[in-house]
Amino acid sequence: MRDKSGIECLQKAIFLYGAPASGKSTLGKALAERLGAGFVDLDERIVAEAGMSIPEIFKTRGEPAFRDIESKVLQEVVSASYEKLSTLNFELSTLTVVSLGGGTLLRDENRSLCEENGTIFCIDTPSDEELARRIGAAPGSRPLGDKAKERAAHYASFPNRVAAFFDAQSSLVVVGRGIAPAILAGRNVVADETVARLWSARLGVSPFAIIPSGEEHKTPVTVAKLWRAFSERGLGRKDTVVALGGGVTGDLTGFAAATWMRGISWINVPTTLLSMVDASTGGKTGCDLPDGKNLAGAFHFPKLVVIDTDFLETLSPKLVADGRAEMIKHEAIGGRSWSSELELESGEGDFSRREGAGVSAKEIAENLMVKVGIVREDPLETLGRRILLNCGHTVAHAIEKATGYCVSHGEAVAIGCVEEAKIAVRRGLASASWPEEFAARFAAAGLPTSLPDGISLDVLVPLMRGDKKREGGVVTFALPCGWGDVRGIKIDLSKESL
């Protein structure tokens, strides 16, 4: 991080705050583990200081006495962290994640103390029903009960927000706003040149490796450059590398990490809407070859995925539309009513409105959970379930290659989904009106829905035969047949016409 004068300084702590039962301790422990940081649960320190449980403190001494103890313990925690940092050379392990109580920062002096010594992440309050369930599951543990509505304005005053967090295989996914700088501070960052130019100064980071932007650079040559940078940086088996950029940056950095010293840990910080909702959590890493897209790769899940909607501020409408294409694809897989059925560590809070590029953190989290749910069932693509995520992509990848990647991935996905919907109709799997309905959804997001001039399915078939999901001449398509109805269908492209 940087101080007010702009001089680079150490990030001393991440303080997690929010309503009682919002998940501060749960997130704190998981985040500290992924960051190699220390963890402090302030409530546990208060119990140790007082020699009695928090309900007993309230009952025997009252809330004012509890707040005094709380302030004293917080000061001790912050002082201990600062002394450790000031006497040691900076290492990632010197970062501390602190879980605060639900009312700790009601005192102005406590809030100032935390703001001066780190960054406060405020977790959005879960829904009323979920909050009641959590509080009811531990009767008597929260003497003040549900204070979320009473303190809503107070919680909303914190700018750095966590909208949702959840596990995706071995990855912890944290979605919010203003959360990336504190997590990136002092780490081994790889960024693409566009992101480095736009964001390095704002984030207070200096990437040790900068790779060229664009799909055309997603090659073994760039991977070799990353390996060389890893070597010059002295990265070893216990080190962690961070990918800061879009899907290409994540794929390349993750692949380099997977193959460096037979695998080192990595953290993914996606900066485009497309990479946030698509490439960030699947664990697929790799690079393109002349024979096809992503043919060289490995499954290597990041240990932490940080999705920060602040990055959407610098995206063009075209790049936002690219991300919307994958979101609409997820709607087709999960059904357009899927968002009401998801269970997230999330709530309305400050994210009930849209932000940035017209996409809220909560919306991203809910949409991403469609992919996460499928990946959980079939992490290494061995059970056939994960093929559903390929909806529209068999045609899309062929379009990208046929046009020399002049058509963006999101645009290709939109066109591919509509073309594959037409294939579903021709095979008697979908209603005749379905492709038009599906196309209208993409068009409303500003995406093309027709094949580029000079390109036909006949032109694309030879390219589709090179799909990495082929078995001989047989390619498995994930055909969209309606909302919530995507089917894996094998088509022998050497014998059958599309």
Image (tube, rainbow, N blue to C red):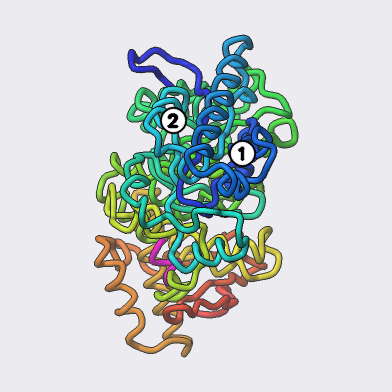
Q: Nearer the viewer, mark 2 or mark 1?
A: 2
Assign a secondary structure to mark 2: helix
Q: Are marks 2 and 1 in contact (CB under 8 Å)?
A: no
Residue 285 visible in the shown view: no
Residue ID at (41%, 77%): 421
Residue ID for mark 2:
110
Amino acid type, label 1:
Asp
Image quadrant of residue 57?
Answer: top right
Placement of 382 over or under 245, stated as above or below:
below
Amino acid type, label 2:
Asn
Placement of 215 over or under 190, stated as above or below:
below
Residue ID at (45%, 31%): 119
Specify start and end residues of the magenta stretch as a single range. Answer: 327-331
* Left-right relation of 415 to 208: left
Q: Position of residue 125 (x, y in %)?
A: 43, 55
Placement of 58 over or under 237, stated as above or below:
below
Q: Residues within 10 Å of mark 2 (few under 14, many from 20)?
A: some
Residue ID for mark 1:
41
